[in-house]
Amino acid sequence: MRIVSWQKALILWFQGKVEILEYHNIFARSARASFQLPSVIRLKAYVRPRISEGVRFCRENVYIRDSFTCQYCGDQLPAKHLTLDHVIPVSHKGKKSWTNVVSACRECNQRKANRTPKQAEMPLLKEPRAPVWLPVIEFEIKPGQVPEGWLQYLRYKAG
């Protein structure tokens, strides 16, 4: 089970990959059509995750790998307060890769500037590595927040 955006749900439906089980009372409108937004969808066929390609390198996945923690000072911050830092700066031929990019707070990233951690005397908390897998970030849905249409599909007991 997974929560997806309404945009993703509509795309999957347009592609014929899902069937809609429940609808919201909200519509998405285009210049020529109107679509009732799906609330619950079901895949028509199981899609096996692509593990052989490895974990996709992107900003969000670096933050997840580093537990949303600055790898210099150790502060844990929300994503909007983090930046990506090249351990070996691009100007020193550092690559944009799992083993050269870490999460950093803005202050540490600016203080380190265009230097290596050794030159800046800012050691890393841990060496960056390519993850084999990433944990799924789960949403916590509190009682009273679960949409009515979801209840029969969840192992959820109110109260």
Image (spheres, rainbow, N blue to C red):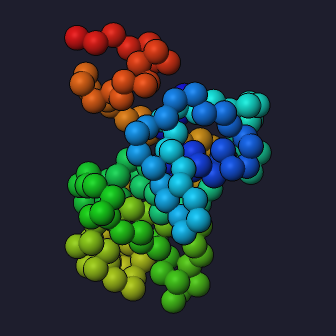
Identify which residue is drawn at 27% across, 30% down: 145
Note whether 158 is above or below 102 in the view shown: above
Report whether residue 126 is seen: no
Residue projecting furthest to the bottom: 91
Residue 18 % position (x, y): 68, 37
Residue 141 % position (x, y): 32, 29
Pick the quarter of the image with the N terminus: top right
Note whether 51 is above or below 58 in the view shown: above
Q: How many marks?
A: 0
Residue 138 % position (x, y): 41, 35
Note whether 130 is above or below 3 in the view shown: below
Which of 35 and 20 lies nearest the eye of the viewer? 35
Q: Is residue 56 left or right of residue 65?
A: right
Which of 79 and 68 lies nearest the eye of the viewer? 79
Tell me which corner region of the image, top left, top right, bottom left or bottom right, holds residue 155. top left
Identify which residue is drawn at 59% across, 53% down: 130
Identify which residue is drawn at 45% across, 50% down: 27
Identify which residue is drawn at 25% across, 60% down: 73
Tell me which corner region of the image, top left, top right, bottom left or bottom right, holds residue 111. bottom left
Note whether 119 is above or below 37 in the view shown: below
Q: Is residue 7 left or right of residue 150?
A: right
Report whether residue 90 is seen: yes
Q: Is residue 8 left or right of residue 145?
A: right
Which of 77 and 99 lies nearest the eye of the viewer? 77
Pick the quarter of the image with the C terminus: top left
Residue 119 % position (x, y): 37, 79
